[in-house]
Image (cartoon, grey):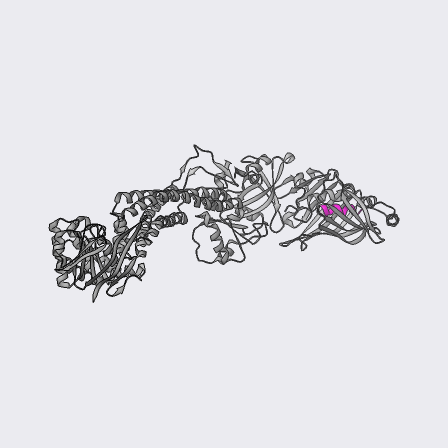
Amino acid sequence: MYKFLLAFFIVVTSTTGAAEPSQVQAVSSLTQELSAKELVTKIETQYQGKTSHGRTKMLIKTRHWQRTLEMESWSEGRDKFLTRILAPSKERGTCTLKVDDNIWNYLPRIDRMIKIPSSLMGESWMGSHLTNDDLVKENKIDQLYKLAIIASSTERITIEGIPLPQAAVVWGKIIYVVDPQKLIPIYIDYFDEEGVKVRTINFSEPALIDQRWIPKVMRIIPLEKPEEFTEMQYIEIEFDVSLSDGLFSLKSLRNR
Amino acid sequence: MNTVELKNTSRHYQSGSLVVKAVDQVDLHLKKGDFAVLAGPSGSGKSTLLNLIGGLDRPTDGEVYIDNELLNDKSDEQLSRERLEKIGFIFQAYNLIPVLTAYENVQFIMQIRGIPEKEHREKIMPLLKELGLEGLEDRKPPELSGGQQQRVAVARAIVLEPAIILADEPTANLDSETAVNLLQIMKQLNEEKNVTFLFSSHDPMVIEIAERVISMRDGKITRDERK
Amino acid sequence: MIILRIAYRNLWRNKRRTQLTMIAMVFACSLLVFSLGYYDGILWNLINNATEKENGHITIARPGYVDAPSINSNFLPEAFFDEIGKEPINNIKGYCSRVTTFALLSSGPESKSQTQPSEIMGIDPVAESKLSKLADCVVEGSFIKGNEREIVLGRGLARRLKAKPGDEIILVSNGADGSIASEILILAGIIDTGEELRDSSLAIMNIREVQQLFVLGENVHSLRIFLEDPLSAKEVAKRLQKRTKSFEVTPWHSIFPQISSVLGIWFGMQLFTMAIYYAALAMITFNTMYMAFLERMHEFGVMRAIGLSRLKLSLLILFESFIIAGISGLIGITIGTAANYLLYYHPIDLSHWFDNLSWGGSFIKIQLFCVPGWSTTMMPFLAILVLGILVAAFPAFRLLRLKPVEALREA
């Protein structure tokens, strides 16, 4: 039950990088010649500014309950990420810090910090349909999977990803569909080791922010419970902001 | 009318290669009210003849009638019924059911006959009194003398008023005084109630009391005389 | 009925023989009732060591909960009791309310704290102390006493968390409404349920605190019913299930299939024991019965001669045997049951001399403990009646074919 919200941020932040509109054009004309890996790496890194700062709403819907969290988050590069719950007030101040492959949670009610051990990376993050693992691995698709373009048109390119032997990935296969014009993902399908599709993440409402396309909404649907989902939505986002030193540290978790 | 009628009746046994003619081509008629004795040495066929008349044994040849009914054709169960209704048996000894009192031994036969319980006492008590067993009705056989036991056996044999009472050496185990006493009681019943008696004996004293003496030897009737 | 009277009186004719026969029968019957009671005692031991520790004999939960527990599959206990109605169900000792959910527990200083997933079980300490043996499993510290923020950990879990009684345990999870639940608890005690796997994840808390922390209100996840007789769980569960549609009633048999599978073998074993005891008994009694029968040939001949039918004569000998068996059986089951009751209320512990046996998620305590039971009493009794008829069957058959003339010749 311990589900977490980090992944979305990573995916979103990583797929919303900094680029000039003119470059967008140029890049998209180049995609035909790019290999699958180069294309994904481009998407994953290009839209990621050096740093970012934003506010997000996360809507979690399950069979039994539905709730909305509002969060503020910061990121630096691919590896540092911090988020803090603003609402509801009961959970205000709850933080998650990711540095490299480590995740800590801070619980203001009891003023304690918990490091998520590697054995629990598959657990839910903050009750959402994302796992801790998603926070860590989601922005490393190009490093974890062997990628190949299996269909291509001017509107969309379909990439198949098979986990590399050494990658500790829970999926058996992913299908990554991107918009080569805007250089944003359209959806990602996740398959288990038996080849059954178990999860889909849809990206929608692209918006041009800071001269880069960003899908403002991401919805994670677990296919074994199709009536459930977690949807994340940007309220605001800015890139390449200056962040205070030591922001991504355990100390800052408690001080916030 | 004959109470008992035997027509050319035989009872042969196969004993190895030997045929034992226990009863051989006997003709016999007993009338109602007869007080007859079968006399003869042991092995002369007296018991076998009594068994044939009583339906305990079946003849190998000839016919047996009781009250003009042919016994030969009857099944074992029918014979059983026949014995219950028409024949009273008195054996040499151990006639009684040891676990029942004198009264109950007499009652036993009424019960298996299905006579209503309430009639038992008024029938049994006078009879026991008549046989000189008053006050002994609650004793069990081991607590009675041999003569008393035989008198209870007589009471049992007579209580349902059968067509005939068959007694196989009833006095053999009694001393002579008791034996005579028993015979006199039987004689009395014969005279007062006109009960037909056929008993076997080789005791001269017993034979003396009988009205009709049927002598047997080697399965055949050698003499049949009325006094 | 005169035949019955004769049969009964005949028993006292040869007192010594009848007494010896009866002693053999009483001995076999009482020993059998005792043995079957002892078998059931072992079985109860096995079942109760598995069920009474924690699971209970019958679980009441929302349909599907037992197979796939979910924090949201909860209910108010009153809802269940309203549904089954007022009519009482026999044999129920009581019930425990339970809440079960998952949480991350951590312990130790923040810089090197240990975090482990665990199954949190919320229990009512008062009800548990009366019914379950959970509190008996505490090996260090104490059980939940009803103080604030107490937690009891399985031995393996405590070891992994490197926690000892008195230590702080941090709990983090999500409540039934998805909200984040967090609490600082104090480790009250460490429990050893005998199952290593379970002890490596089990954490016990006061149900009130779990309900509050996980936003469950007064709701519970299951009611655990405890019975006087664990063997009746299936039947009681069936009766309860008939009265409710919105709840699933699960007897322990489904939860401990391995132990449940023993039941069949057990019954077979009891029958086998009965067969052995009574086979020996039949050999002894047949002998004496047959001797008595042969001695009374003349008497049977007289009875047949004066007009008793074959069938009634056969019945006589059957009745005699039946009465002996019946009286001996009654005495036998009285003695056997008395012994069973005695050892039911005052079991004799033999574990000083023997080690307990572990088996199928449970263990067998070595003790002289018997369970008096209706079937373990009636089975030997009915069987001895059958035996009485069987040993008399051959003499009875011979009486059917008895030739009075031949019988009379026997002195």
Where does residue C350 sit, x and y in percent of width and height? 42, 35
Going by the image, does B219 lie left or right of A182?
A: left
Q: Quadrant of residue B133?
A: bottom left
**In the image, what residue occupies the spot 67% across and 39% down?**
A118
Residue at far top of view: C353
Is residue C100 something that shows in the picture?
yes
Q: Main secondary structure of the magenta part?
A: helix
Q: Is residue A154 above or below residue A52?
A: below
Q: Is residue C236 above or below residue C183?
A: below
Where does residue C85 sit, x and y in percent of width and height? 47, 58
Viewer-nearest residue: C3 or A105: C3
Q: Is residue C205 above or below residue C318?
A: above
Viewer-nearest residue: B131 or A218: B131
Residue at far bottom of view: B1
Going by the image, does C141 lie left or right of A118?
A: left
Going by the image, does A197 lie left or right of C192?
A: right
Where does residue C104 sit, x and y in percent of width and height? 61, 42
Is residue A82 something that shows in the picture?
no
Screen quadrant of the C terminus of chain A: top right
State which region is magenta: A7-17
Where does residue C341 sit, x and y in percent of width and height? 37, 44
